[in-house]
Image (spheres, rainbow, N blue to C red):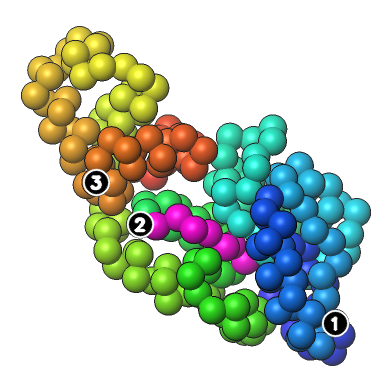
Amino acid sequence: MQNLRSRQQQIILADDRPVIIAGVRGYIDRCPDLSVAATATTSDQILARLKDTPCDILITEFSIAIENMNDGFTLLSYVRRHYPKLCLIVLTLNNMPAVMYQIIKCGVNAALHMNDELVTIREAIDSAESNTRYIGKTVRNILRSGPVGIMPTKRETEVLRMYAEGQSMQEIATRLHKSVKTIALQKMSAMRKVGLRNDVELGRYTRGHVRPDEKNFPTSKY
């Protein structure tokens, strides 16, 4: 990222909760070299503001209301691909290691948790200027809590995808010509590898955050 300290850096601030916008904006307003150029409350608004508002930094909540896209990962990947020089900072309340891992894989400059201090926004921007990715303390702790370094195999991913689509274990077993016990073991293995502890977390993981398919769900090559 180019050094922008010679002028005021322009920020697009995106969140669908007014109180978060107000809190982050209040901090930014106290930084003389930073300015909020525009705000957004949906993914479509983010893309519109990026087109019509010159800016250096996008600070967005990961779970912002998504329009015309699959999920937050699709949004982050699109922004990174089309605006490679933009400083992309993500805020999130999510506590799942697998989700944090995927956010970072989207190429963000910084991943921050809502439990982090506001000053981490300043630290993240400074790190981006020196071409260093910034991972907030809370996010680092979340990543350490789950075995996210080992990704599911293609078959495990397929089982997880089918289960997330609403198919029963028996239906999956019949379709894949495997025993129910084998399918159950593959499902458990996939969930363990991405840091999911139960079906409730699996539902959250696949609903509104990520769809476990070949496009945005990483797998082992084996």
Q: Say which residue label 3 marks.
A: 197
Task: Say which mark, if any, is on residue 217.
Answer: none
Real-space CA distance between mark 2 and mark 3, rounded to the nearest whole angstrom: 11 Å
- Identified by mark 3, the residue type is Arg
Q: Answer yes or no: is residue 112 visible.
A: yes
Q: Which residue is drawn at 80% across and 86% down?
A: 33
Q: Main secondary structure of the magenta part?
A: strand
Residue interval drawn in magenta: 86-95
Q: Nearer the viewer, residue 206 or 80?
A: 206
Q: Residue at x 30, y 31 (%)?
A: 160
* Discs 2, 3 touching: Cβ within 8 Å: no
Which quadrant holds residue 13? bottom right
Comes first in the chain, label 1 or label 2: 1
- Identified by mark 2, the residue type is Pro
Q: Say which residue label 2 marks.
A: 97
Q: Say which residue label 1 marks.
A: 8
State yes or no: residue 2 in magenta.
no
Few, some or many C-alpha atoms within 10 Å of disc 2 (few <14, some 14-19, many ≥20)?
Answer: many
Q: Which residue extends farthest right?
A: 52
Comes first in the chain, label 2 or label 3: 2
Q: Mark 2 or 3, which is nearer the eye?
A: 3
